[in-house]
Amino acid sequence: MPSRRSSGQQRLNQLLREVRDRLIGRQTVLTVGQQDDSPKRARDARIHLRPEGIVVLGHQESHPHVAHALGMPVPIKGEWSSPASFLSHLTMRRPNSLDGQFWARARGRELLHPEPDPAPDLPDGRKIDGQAP
């Protein structure tokens, strides 16, 4: 049976699923993506991974604020990170407000939730803990 090669988008999605809570550099994204515009594939992964409860953070807009609020390393230009997030109703940890909903970084058993809430969408103009991005 012939093996089917995965696309650069599929490989980057899998990388961002598996490497959590750590910064992923541009060179890694270029190597895994194996395409001319691999950084675009990392940005597009936000759309693909959001339904799985994974937010892909970069260096622009509200993303550095979100990374800081979640207690993660803050990406600089050419870096991404992909924490799993969950909609926080009752938690012992301090949740972070994002447009009126409370989110926290998933840990331990929270990562095993069979049907995660979609990760927050982080377009322009969102507020993090009452601060403008």
Image (cartoon, rainbow, N blue to C red):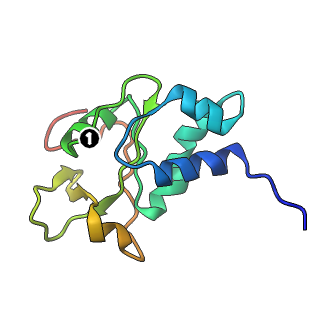
* Residue 82 locus on image (x, y percent): 41, 47
Query: From this viewpoint, which residue is outermost toward the bottom?
Result: 114
Tell me where residue 37 sits by quadrant: top right
| On screen, residue 132 above or below 6 | above
Label 1: element kind: loop
Which residue is drawn at the image coordinates 16% and 36% (left, top)?
131
Which residue is drawn at the image coordinates 20% and 43% (left, top)?
71
- Three-letter amino acid code of the residue under disc 1: Met
Tell me where residue 23 sits by quadrant: top left
* Residue 69 locus on image (x, y percent): 19, 42
Quarter of the image that includes the C terminus: top left
Dot 1: within a 10 Å radius of its alpha carbon, few (fewer than 14), some, or many (20 or more) residues?
Answer: some
Q: Nearer the viewer, residue 40 or 131?
A: 40
Query: From this viewpoint, which residue is outermost toward the right?
Result: 1
Q: Is residue 121 left or right of residue 68?
A: right
Quarter of the image that includes the N terminus: bottom right
Tell me where residue 48 sits by quadrant: bottom right
User: Label 1, on which residue?
Assistant: 72
